Image (spheres, grey):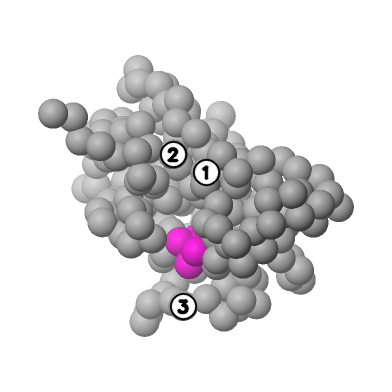
């Protein structure tokens, strides 16, 4: 019997050598499977991109060329990530960035990704008043729980902050509509005009 993962989703984050998969490669990935608001499985891996990591990327992430020496290439690790994700919906902060790298790296190994995506950055913009919507800013602004030794711009640490942000957003919406929002409703909010969000909630309250 096939495993029922209809109530599960994946939170994903990549660290890369640059902003575009046209010229950049993945150097780290982390992903967690969440069910009933709890992490039930975790994947985290450094990868050797086949090129030097630019110094400014090391400055942001702390990931050095020495750290990725001997690690699997993206091509070697993507099948593992593909299997881990399965058909589950995917969440990410600034999801368009992670999605384009995911699609590109999977295309490199002849695999496709057709999973639904949700973006916690877009949701936060529509629901939260904050100085800006960087993950580090929202973490501080909302006083989100972080682990001891947390390091921003490392994939697994960013995934866990995204999870906390996601739970905050769901709880915030639940109070407004008096029920827990499902994935489709959240996808609708993500693309809804900010100035009409209040009226949308009033329809479901």
Q: Relative to 100, is 198 above or below?
A: below
Split into 4 quadrants, where in the image is the N terminus? top left
6, 164: nearer the viewer: 6
List the single residue furthest toward the top.
110
The magenta stretch spans residue 163: yes
Residue depicted at 35% across the width and 32% down the height:
87
Looking at the image, residue 188 sits to the left or right of residue 108; the answer is right
Q: Earlier in the sequence, mark 2 or mark 1?
A: 2
Q: Which residue is mark 3?
A: 145
| Marks 3/1: CA–CA distance | 23 Å
Residue depicted at 66% across the width and 40% down the height:
188
Q: Position of residue 103 (x, y in %)?
A: 47, 29
Q: Position of residue 160 (x, y in %)?
A: 42, 64
Q: Which residue is mark 2?
A: 89
Q: Which is closer to the viewer, label 3 or label 1?
A: 1
Find the magenta span and give its range.
161-167
Q: Which residue is mark 1?
A: 183
Tell me which corner region of the image, top left, top right, bottom left or bottom right, holds residue 125: bottom right
- Badge 2 marks a residue whose secondary structure is loop
Q: Is residue 127 visible?
A: yes
The answer to whether marks 2 and 1 mark residues whose Cβ atoms lie closer than 8 Å is yes
Looking at the image, residue 154 sits to the left or right of residue 141; the answer is left
Most common secondary structure along the magenta stretch: helix
Q: Is residue 97 visible?
A: no
Q: Which mark is residue 13?
A: none
- Badge 1 marks a residue whose secondary structure is helix
The answer to whether marks 2 and 3 mark residues whose Cβ atoms lie closer than 8 Å is no
Q: Earlier in the sequence, mark 2 or mark 3?
A: 2
Residue depicted at 86% across the width and 52% down the height:
195
74, 161: nearer the viewer: 161
């Amino acid at each position: 019997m096939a495993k029922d993962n209809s109530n599960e989703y994946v939170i994903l984050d990549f660290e890369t050598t640059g902003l575009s998969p046209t010229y950049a490669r993945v150097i780290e990935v982390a992903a967690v499977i969440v069910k009933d608001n709890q992490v039930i499985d975790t994947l985290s891996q450094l990868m050797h991109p086949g090129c030097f990591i630019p110094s400014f990327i090391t400055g942001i992430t702390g990931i050095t060329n020495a750290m990725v020496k001997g690690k699997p290439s993206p091509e070697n690790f993507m099948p593992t990530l593909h299997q881990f994700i399965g058909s589950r919906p995917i969440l990410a902060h600034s999801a368009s960035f992670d999605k384009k790298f995911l699609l590109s790296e999977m295309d490199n190994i002849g695999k496709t990704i057709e999973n639904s995506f949700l973006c916690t950055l877009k949701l936060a913009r529509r629901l939260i008043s904050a100085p800006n919507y960087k993950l580090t800013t929202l973490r501080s602004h909302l006083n989100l729980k972080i682990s001891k030794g947390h390091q921003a711009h490392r994939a697994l640490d960013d995934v866990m902050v995204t999870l906390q942000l996601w739970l905050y957003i769901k709880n915030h919406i639940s109070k407004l509509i008096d029920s827990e929002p499902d994935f489709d409703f959240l996808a609708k909010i993500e693309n809804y005009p900010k100035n009409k969000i209040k009226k949308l909630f009033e329809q479901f309250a």
